[in-house]
Image (cartoon, rainbow, N blue to C red):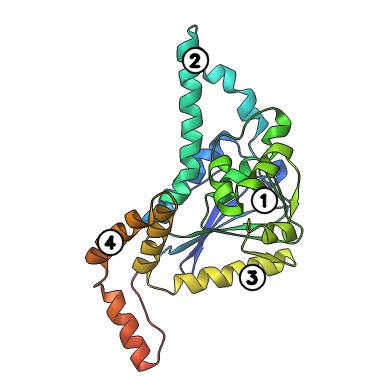
Amino acid sequence: MEFSTLAVSLDANVATIALNRPDKANAMSEPMWYEIEQAMQWLDETPEARVGVLTGRGKYFTSGIDLSLLMGLGAKIEDEDDGRRHEKLRRLILRLQDTLTSIERCRKPVLAAVNGACIGGGIDLVTACDMRYCSSNAYFTVKEIDVGMTADVGTLQRLPRLIGEGMARELAYTGRRVDGIEAQKIHLVNRCFETPEALEAGVMEIARTIAAKSPLAIRGCKEMITYGRDHSVADGLNYIATWNAAMLLSKDLFEAGAAAMQKRDPVFRD
């Protein structure tokens, strides 16, 4: 696929999706929002792509939502009727939310590799990913409070489930910076690497490890963990019983067993 705001590549079953507006600090413009969703659809539908790595080109991961998008809202929702104007704004917010939900909706795991600043909408973006990693020069800030708005596309819903309600409230209320080391301590990221180079190498190693596993089983893991987050234990157990009743007896299961007996690496179909 061709993108104007993203750089997308595929190598050894790992897809790299890079925010590619380095001259604009990877600010999330309107085209970028829509292209992120398109990239997630491509990742989901491309059998050879087993894992996605979301990163940013240049100095910043992302400076957040592009101010030109916010400044253009008035023209987009213009209507002589207040009710219809407000309905248009609601639908636009829901559309932006759905872009980030497309990361969760994608059947393949998506790993965020954060180098430099991850600001505002960037928090919304990475909290929708399966795992997050950063370099020591990274920092995170829920910046919306400093521009007089309430974050509305996912941070306030997903962040508390990652770092706990109290810490999420602190970050949302204050807008303070969290550096890479603190981000690991509060479980915003799984690991903080010392350098950007170590970050890239480390995340690719993790991605390739995942890509070598049964793709069907990995897709099941993502489905179950995401489902379990929003449902009771009983609901989750019922769902996995139904899932495995349909998916368990796959060729992947028998290939994993044969590989173990033959002391070789398993080879799974895409």
- Image position of 68 (left or right of 226): right
Dot 2 amino acid type: Arg
> How far across and how far down the image is residue 56, in percent?
64, 53
Which mark's residue is nearer the viewer, 3 or 2? Answer: 2
Q: Secondary structure at mark 4?
A: helix
Along the polypeptide, which appears first: circle 1 or circle 4?
1
Give the percent coordinates (x, y) of residue 190: 61, 63
Amino acid at dot 4: Trp
Reading the image, the residue beneath label 1 is 61
Q: Nearer the viewer, residue 116 or 129?
A: 129
* SS category of the residue bearing label 1: loop
Residue drawn at the location 33% of the way across and 72% of the way down: 269
Residue on which the image places disc 3: 201
Q: Which quadrant of the view contains residue 173? A: top right
**Which class describes the residues within 10 Å of circle 4: few (<14), some (14-19), or many (20+)?**
some
Asked if residue 213 is positioned above or below residue 26 in the image, the reply reads: below
> For the residues carrying marks 4 and 3, which lies nearer the camera in this image?
4
Q: CA distance from mark 4 to mark 3?
A: 34 Å
| Image marks 3 and 2: residues in contact by CB distance under 8 Å | no
Say whether disc 4 or disc 2 marks the residue closer to the N-terminus: 2
